[in-house]
């Protein structure tokens, strides 16, 4: 189990992780926190084609993020299985 910080866009489909840090301005971090992207929140990558938007399952909800947004979300890969919900 690795605890290296990577960006959300580095996760492959089906891969799980946990939010570690949000990098960005107040508006960005506030909006993502409202969507459930808070430190320690477990997530699973649903769709990541390597370009264009990606889809993440977090707190029982699927969220689509653009590449630029995903590059500002730091996660720890391999934080165990993510429970449904």
Image (cartoon, rainbow, N blue to C red):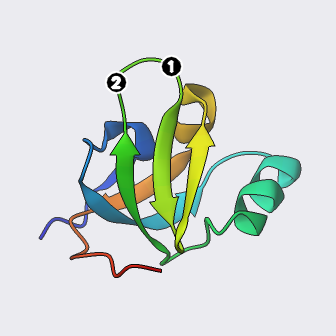
Residue 7 or 13: which is nearer the viewer? Answer: 13
Q: Which element is circle 2 on?
A: loop
Residue 15 or 73: which is nearer the viewer? Answer: 15
**Residue 21, quarter of picture:** bottom right
Q: Is residue 28 above or below residue 49?
A: below
Residue 64 x, y percent position in the rendering: 59, 42
**Badge 2: residue crowd in 10 Å (few <14, some 14–19, many ≥20):** few
Q: Residue furthest left?
A: 1
Q: Is residue 42 above or below residue 52?
A: below
**Residue 1, quarter of picture:** bottom left
Residue 50 x, y percent position in the rendering: 35, 22
Q: Residue furthest top?
A: 51
Taking the spot 54% from the left edge, 49% from the top edge, the residue there is 73
**Alpha-carbon distance for marks 1 and 2?**
7 Å
Residue 23 numbered mark, or none: none
Q: Which element is circle 1 on?
A: loop
Residue 49 numbered mark, or none: 2
Q: Is residue 25 left or right of residue 39?
A: right
Disc 1 to disc 2: CB gap under 8 Å: yes
Residue 52 numbered mark, or none: 1
**Badge 1: residue crowd in 10 Å (few <14, some 14–19, many ≥20):** few
Taking the spot 26% from the left edge, 73% from the top edge, the residue there is 79
Q: Residue furthest right?
A: 27
Residue 2 x, y percent position in the rendering: 16, 65
Taking the spot 21% from the left edge, 76% from the top edge, the residue there is 80
Q: Is residue 9 left or right of residue 53?
A: left
Residue 57 x, y percent position in the rendering: 47, 59
Q: How many marks?
A: 2
Taking the spot 37% from the left edge, 47% from the top edge, the residue there is 46
Q: Is residue 45 above or below residue 34?
A: above
Residue 78 or 64: which is nearer the viewer? Answer: 64
């Amino acid at each position: 189990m690795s605890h290296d910080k990577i960006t959300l866009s580095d996760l492959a489909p089906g891969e799980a992780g946990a939010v570690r840090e949000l990098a960005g301005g107040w508006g960005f971090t506030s909006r993502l926190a409202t969507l459930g992207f808070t430190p320690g929140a477990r997530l699973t990558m649903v769709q990541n084609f390597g370009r264009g938007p990606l889809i993440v399952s977090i707190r029982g909800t699927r969220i689509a993020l653009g590449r630029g947004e995903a590059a500002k979300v730091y996660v720890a890969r391999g934080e165990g299985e993510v429970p449904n919900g």
